[in-house]
Amino acid sequence: MDVTVADDRIDLTKARGEWAAGERVALVPTMGALHEGHRSLMREARARADRVVVSIFVNPLQFGPGEDFSRYPRTFDADLEVCRAEGVDVVFAPSAEAMYGPDRQVSVSSGAMGEVVEGASRPGHFDGVLTVVLKLFNLVQPHVAVFGQKDAQQLALIRRMVRDLDVPVEIVGAPTVREPDGLALSSRNRYLSDAERGSALALSRSLRAGAAESAPSRILAAAQAVLDAAASEISLDYVVLVDPATFTPVGEAYAGEAVLAVAARVGSTRLIDNMVLTLGTSGAQTA
């Protein structure tokens, strides 16, 4: 069966209306330029639902001045083939006008949690993310939505939004998918030259170095040392060890899950990565 493409809310409602009552619906929100990481989200969605909707929408609200909105890769025909191969039922691919209308005024605020770490580097970014995600939830009406752990702060904020606003959607975080050499899959990886791609491996190396340590201070020092050694090849934005629920720094006596997160610019391309660690008396372990 071929995938249905819905260009606006009318088409989406029509497609959804053809499904049997009681069928469980899963949503995978994307900005397109789909890769194996997105495929893994679709497979997770399929395992949890009868129907799978993938949204493809490059959301202007989450890009700041000088960011890569205009050059963000748009590969709709190839993306559609990926969705077709993964058995997706509906691809929701609205224009910005269809998504927001001409006179949008109300947005979602990510609060203080959206102003730290990644939010400090990209002011307003998470307000844009949460606004479009809430709209997608209202339009698609999924029972479950699947997001990648690579965008760890985004995932945490979506969970917080769902909790704070009583949104009846189950949020599933799927593991980061990596290349064999450790580079986290990202649509922005296609910007990298061969030399820059080699430099970008410093991000995942720093995470592995940190994960080999136990106390928070030693984890951060080990990760920082790797990034310092690559300082001529990358421009570091941040490396932090934070509580996954609040994205505030963890103390030396912290026990439980923590996120070791890094962001850096490689050439003109900004990349992020993270690793979830479990801290405790036995030392750090990858979660």
Image: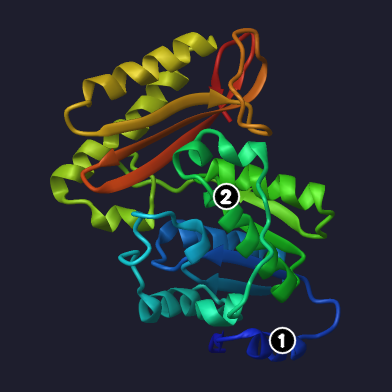
Q: For the residue carrying disc 2, how many other residues have a C-alpha within 10 Å: few (<14), some (14-19), or many (20+)?
A: many
Label 1 SS? helix
- Report the mark closest to the observer, 1 or 2: 2
Q: Measured along the vertical axis of the image, is residue 252 above or below residue 211?
A: above
In the rendering, at what x and y percent does residue 118 appear?
49, 39
Out of 222 and 134, give the one closest to the viewer.
134
Q: Nearer the viewer, residue 92 or 125?
A: 125
- Asked which quadrant contains residue 264, the reply is top left
Q: Label 2 is placed on what type of residue?
A: Phe
Residue drawn at (72%, 84%) of the image: 16
- Whole-percent x, y for residue 98 in the image: 58, 82
- Residue 187, by quadrant, is bottom left
- Which label belongs to residue 126? 2
Q: Which mark is residue 13?
A: 1
Provide residue 244's location: percent of width, then percent of height: 63, 32
* Quadrant in which the N terminus appears: bottom right
Residue 245 x %, y %: 68, 34
Check disc 1 and give the amino acid type. Thr
